[in-house]
């Protein structure tokens, strides 16, 4: 199916990515991000994934320049015994000089036309309120607000950086250290488990732990090829913490460090509401990241009671709600048969999903 279209004035052409487009896409992303992404990053994200045989990007060009772009990350989604492919829209940018021309709508509609009733079952992504409103006009449906939890170790780094609040920075950091120190002393890690750290993600081990307890809810299907690709992102440092008992791997946590300040707990296995080893693993994560500004996690990655014990607080608390805007989950079915098990109704039921940063982040 061809995506190529043109406006009446022939000013803009909307089409799929072609081999010579990479530099144009990177230049456009630079206008939005104030930093040019590397070619290695592009190739990892859009050319080296183990699921697609094409570069999943739609774009608009004018006079040979890429002026709007939207990418799509493939994600295997499991529900019970069924595994389907979904696509996650990411990296949507329209050049400032070409906004209010309907380009975002056009490149999104082109992707919808291309993928409808094909292999991907649905789009899912995590927009802010403004983006969600635009996507709802194109057939997206809100699922829920994503729950996140944060251990704020250096609150001063979250305040304005102009120097006017330096005394408050220091006071806030001191209070946080005192509070978290008390919380940490209340934790009781078990000596039943030996924790090993891996800078290269042990995909085989993680897959085996995942398969020991597969949840019934919709979630990313954890498999070796996914871990080897997704956790090899340029510019991010990943660490896998594996808990073993009698030399057998029984649980794990994977973290992602961004710019040395923000640490995300992206995955915890097995995917159940509690495991004896989680406290030991989380204690190791906290110990290794004492200098980080914030440790964060999402959804039901780890039990709330355990997170609270280690000083994590919900994004809904008064302080964090002022510093962070809500992230929504939204879906758009691509299979038009409403009788399918993955039609709009089950996809938009919050209780049907089990989310972590493995789904939310890209």
Image (cartoon, helix red, strand yellow):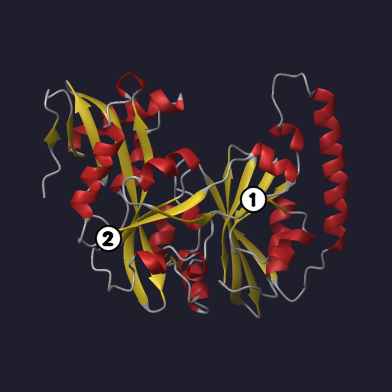
Crowding near the residue tagged with mark 2, few <14, some 14–19, many ≥20 C-alpha atoms within 10 Å: some
Q: Can residue 105 be seen in this view?
A: yes
- Residue labelled with disc 2: 120
Q: Residue at x 71, y 51 (%)?
A: 288
- Tell whether label 1 touches label 2 (CB within 8 Å): no
Q: Can residue 223 be seen in this view?
A: no
Disc 2 on helix, strand or loop?
loop
Question: In the image, which is nearer the foreground, mark 2 or mark 1?
Answer: 2
- Residue labelled with disc 1: 296
Query: In the image, 3: left or right of 218?
Result: left
Residue 230 numbered mark, or none: none
Task: Report the number of numbered marks.
Answer: 2
Crowding near the residue tagged with mark 1, few <14, some 14–19, many ≥20 C-alpha atoms within 10 Å: many
Residue 5: name its quadrant.
top left
Where residue 274 sits: x, y (%)?
A: 66, 73
Q: Alpha carbon of mark 2 to alpha carbon of mark 1: how far?
A: 30 Å
Above or below: residue 65 compared with residue 191: above
């Amino acid at each position: 199916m061809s995506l190529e279209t043109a406006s009446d004035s022939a000013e803009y052409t909307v089409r799929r990515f072609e081999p010579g487009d990479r530099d144009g896409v990177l230049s456009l992303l630079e206008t939005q991000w104030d930093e040019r992404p590397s070619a290695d990053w592009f190739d990892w994200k859009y050319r080296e994934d183990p699921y697609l045989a094409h570069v999943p990007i739609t774009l608009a060009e004018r006079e040979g320049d890429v002026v709007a772009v939207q990418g799509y990350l493939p994600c295997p989604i499991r529900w019970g015994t069924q595994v389907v492919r979904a696509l996650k829209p990411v990296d949507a940018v329209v050049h400032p000089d070409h906004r209010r021309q309907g380009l975002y709508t056009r490149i999104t509609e082109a992707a919808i036309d291309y993928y409808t009733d094909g292999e991907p079952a649905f789009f899912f992504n995590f927009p802010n309120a403004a983006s969600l409103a635009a996507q709802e006009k194109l057939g997206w449906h809100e699922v829920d607000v994503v729950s996140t939890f944060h251990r704020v170790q250096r609150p001063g780094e979250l305040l304005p950086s102009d120097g006017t609040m330096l005394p408050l920075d220091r006071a806030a950091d001191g209070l946080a250290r005192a509070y978290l120190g008390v919380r940490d002393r209340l934790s009781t890690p078990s000596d039943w488990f030996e924790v090993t750290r891996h800078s290269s993600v042990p995909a085989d081990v993680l897959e085996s732990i995942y398969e020991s307890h597969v949840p019934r809810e919709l979630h990313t299907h954890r498999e070796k090829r996914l871990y080897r690709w997704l956790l090899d992102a340029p510019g991010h440092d990943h660490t896998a913490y594996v808990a073993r008992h009698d030399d057998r791997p029984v649980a794990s946590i994977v973290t992602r460090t961004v710019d040395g300040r923000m640490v995300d707990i992206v995955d915890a296995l097995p995917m159940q509401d509690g495991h004896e080893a989680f406290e030991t693993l989380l204690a190791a994560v906290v110990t290794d990241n004492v200098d980080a500004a914030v440790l964060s996690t999402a959804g039901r990655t780890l039990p709330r009671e355990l997170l609270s014990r280690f000083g994590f607080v919900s994004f809904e608390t008064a302080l964090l709600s002022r510093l962070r805007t809500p992230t929504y989950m939204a879906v758009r079915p691509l299979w038009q048969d409403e009788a399918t098990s993955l039609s709009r109704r089950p996809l938009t039921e919050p209780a049907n999903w089990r989310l972590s940063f493995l789904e939310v982040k890209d």
